[in-house]
Image: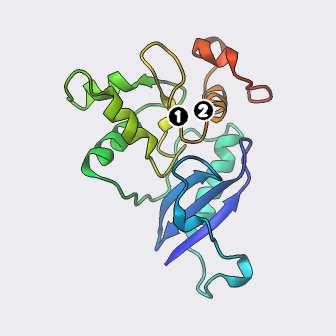
């Protein structure tokens, strides 16, 4: 059974999805690749009578701490579905430390992929079903530009600004409106 929880964030409403005792999805509402099964999330009055998994409350709590600048690492149990290649890319994403960035090409090299695999890495990155916790926002182009974030470039810029001191932000962040995100 799938359980959902909608939470606020500084970057818009988010939807958490859990099955059993693991988080299986974390999306900005309306983002690219928003899951079809989440389009008709039942209201609280129509939810199954079984109690929702504790991981939803834990995830919401840890995300609130992250947005408040009090958490840099997540500890919730994840169970994310994807191809073997996607799983490899997502495993590499969690190795990017808080406040740091990597390029799609750098990730391809770390994965031992041939030159020119940055686009494939970018495609897998974009399909990450647990954004923020698996930090796909920390990946930028080799030229320092913000590209390819399913939640939108303003959100990507905001998340990077939340994690990095202003002096260390990629140049393109200055062009985006990230006012109020410190």
Residue 94 makes an appearance in the image: no
Q: Mark 2 points at which residue?
A: 156
**Residue 159: quadrant of the picture:** top right
* Relative vertical location of residue 9 with respect to residue 135 in this rendering, above or below: below
Task: Identify the residue at image location x=49%, y=39%.
Answer: 135
Q: Quadrant of the C terminus?
A: top right
Residue 153 makes an appearance in the image: yes
Q: Is 49 or 69 nearer to us in this picture? A: 49
**Separation of disc 1 and disc 2 at Cα?**
5 Å
Q: Which colour scheme is used?
A: rainbow
Where is residue 134 drawn, in percent x and y?
A: 47, 44
Task: Identify the residue at image location x=58%, y=52%.
Answer: 27
- Label 2 Cα crowd, 10 Å radius (few <14 / some 14-19 / many 20+): many
| Direction from residue 117 to residue 12 in the image, left or right | right
**Residue 40: quadrant of the picture:** bottom right
The secondary element bearing badge 2 is classed as helix
The reply to whether dot 1 and dot 2 touch (C-beta < 8 Å) is yes
| Direction from residue 87 to residue 10 in the image, left or right | right
Where is residue 9 drawn, in percent x and y?
A: 72, 47
- Label 1 Cα crowd, 10 Å radius (few <14 / some 14-19 / many 20+): many
The secondary element bearing badge 1 is classed as helix
Q: Mark 1 points at which residue?
A: 137
Specify which label sits upstream in the sequence, 1 or 2. 1
Instruction: Pick out the residue farthest to the bottom.
Output: 49
């Amino acid at each position: 059974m799938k359980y959902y929880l909608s939470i606020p964030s500084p970057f818009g409403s988010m939807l958490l999805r859990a099955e059993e005792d693991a988080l299986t999805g974390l999306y900005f509402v309306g983002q690219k690749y928003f899951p079809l099964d989440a389009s008709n999330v039942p209201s609280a009055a129509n939810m199954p009578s079984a109690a929702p998994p504790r991981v939803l409350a834990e995830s919401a709590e840890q995300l609130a701490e992250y947005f408040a600048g009090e958490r840099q690492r997540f500890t919730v149990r994840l169970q994310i579905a994807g191809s073997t290649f996607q799983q490899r890319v997502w495993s590499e994403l969690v190795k990017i430390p808080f406040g740091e960035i990597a390029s799609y090409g750098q990730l391809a090299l770390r994965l031992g992929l041939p030159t020119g695999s940055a686009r494939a890495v970018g495609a897998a990155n974009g399909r990450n079903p647990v954004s923020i916790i698996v930090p796909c926002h920390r990946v930028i182009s080799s030229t320092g530009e913000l590209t390819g974030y399913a939640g939108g470039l303003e959100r990507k810029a905001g998340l990077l600004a939340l994690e990095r001191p202003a002096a260390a932000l990629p140049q393109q962040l200055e062009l985006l409106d990230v006012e109020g995100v410190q």
